Image (cartoon, coloured by chain):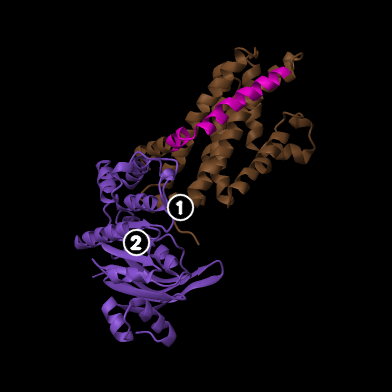
Chain colours: A purple, B brown
Amino acid sequence: MNAIEVSHLRVVRGGRVVLPDLSCTVSSGTIAGLLGPSGSGKTTLIRAIVGVQRVASGHLSVLGKPAGSPELRRLVGYVTQTPSVYGDLTVRENLAYFATMAGVASSAVADVIETVSLGALSSTQVAQLSGGERARVSLAAALLPSPKLLVLDEPTVGLDPVLRQELWDLFHQLAGKGVTFLISSHVMDEADRCQRLLLLREGAVLADATPAELLQRTQSADLEAAFLRLIEAEVSI
Amino acid sequence: MTGQRTLATAGRVLRQLRHDPRTIALMLVVPCLLMTLLRYVYDGQVQIFDHVAPVLLVLFPFTVMFVVTSVAMLRERSSGTLERLLTTPMAKGDLLAGYALAFSVAAVIQVGLVMVLAVGPLGLQIHGGLGALATVALLDALLGTVLGLFLSAFANTEFQAVQFLPAFVLPQLLLCGLFAPRAQMLPILSWLSDVMPLSYAVDAATRAATSSMWTSALTTDVLVVAACIPLFLGLGAGTLRRRTP
């Protein structure tokens, strides 16, 4: 079963066609990486899947329902590129508020703080935190309702390697429980950690394959080289 | 809409204020200082102070809540927290009512302080009931809040949001009858004055301060102001879109 099905999606933002005619799928329980240079339409596609982007035409189905359906609000977690939390509140105050708004028991707050390893900082004002810590608060807020699908826009930017490893371990652990992930990144070394890759360029899907398939088909040693070769050849595989 | 989410939002907005003591000080101290200033500007003319002070008493909460709300809402939009909230099962009304509730609490404290100062040490003579004046001031604070919530949708930056004060509040102030009686204005200005909510708020304040009876004219003014609150709250809800371009 597919967690995400996108067919012939067209999105126009500010008079510019960002996604001309995009189709792709992400199957349930996988970690899918959405990769591509900045400006390739990753964030727009993510926003459309989450249901906050106005779309011109096309069909988007998320967990079997049209994207943006009210039922999906409890099932889909969304983490924006810039952390969307209140800087003038503490970590716990932020999460307690989002828990109430998401309709989640307040006991979930302590759990997600533990999950993103922010226990020692839970009484610190978010504005005092480092960029990486703030990103984790934002992630924790998205984890509150135990979503079935987590859509993360560049979640590991600015994180140190140890923390990045911890987060990826967490993603894999949640995926093992059946959570589907769509994770965007413009860093190719993140691609290795995904089970499926969607390469986006200028609003179109350049490739949809597993990392191993991609390396094999392009006869490249690493994914960065594979991506460059794909662009050079301009043939989709 | 649930009461729990509305209360959580109001609590969150007040908690944000609490982490910002300078804003609290500005909200509470500045109106008191201005009222004191007004008292000594009219040092020899107590009857003018008695006439202007009640109007000022309702203008403070209106203006302050307007600015604070529009900036707070704009920050909510630009920080992405609004988008996050709109992807949760929350109703838009929860957010708006929460804001209105939080700033009403702030307004009660602000109006209470200025009122105690005005009728106490500053010797303001009020012929009407203090309760009526306090009600009008509170409604006015709510009006400022909902107007700020609505207009913040049309500002992209905090610079613009602050400019809405001269753009939307000062014209209402000029036409509200404080500077010239509304009936003696040019017909078009008088008509404009008739459609501006602040005119009714100022009329209500004057009536509440000058008449010891709750008159039917006061009821009309209060009702007009009260009716504007759900109107702008509804318009504000219309500007909160779950999908944006």
Q: Is residue B223 left or right of residue A209?
A: right
> In the picture provided, is A57 more to the left or to the right than B235?
left
* Residue drawn at the location 64% of the way across and 31% of the way down: B200
Where are the magenta residues, as a range?
A: B13-40
Q: Is residue A222 above or below residue B100?
A: below
Query: Label 1 belongs to which residue?
Result: B80
Query: Which residue is label 2 attached to?
Result: A151
Would you say residue B89 sits in the magenta stretch? no
Where in the figure is residue B169, as x and y percent of width and height?
66, 38
- Residue B161 in sight in this render: yes
Quadrant of image for the N terminus of chain A:
bottom left
Is B21 within the magenta? yes
Identify the amino acid type marked 1: Gly
Amino acid on which the number 2 mark rests in the picture: Val
Spatial separation of the CA atoms under disc 2 and disc 1:
15 Å
Query: Magenta region, mostly helix, strand or loop?
Result: helix
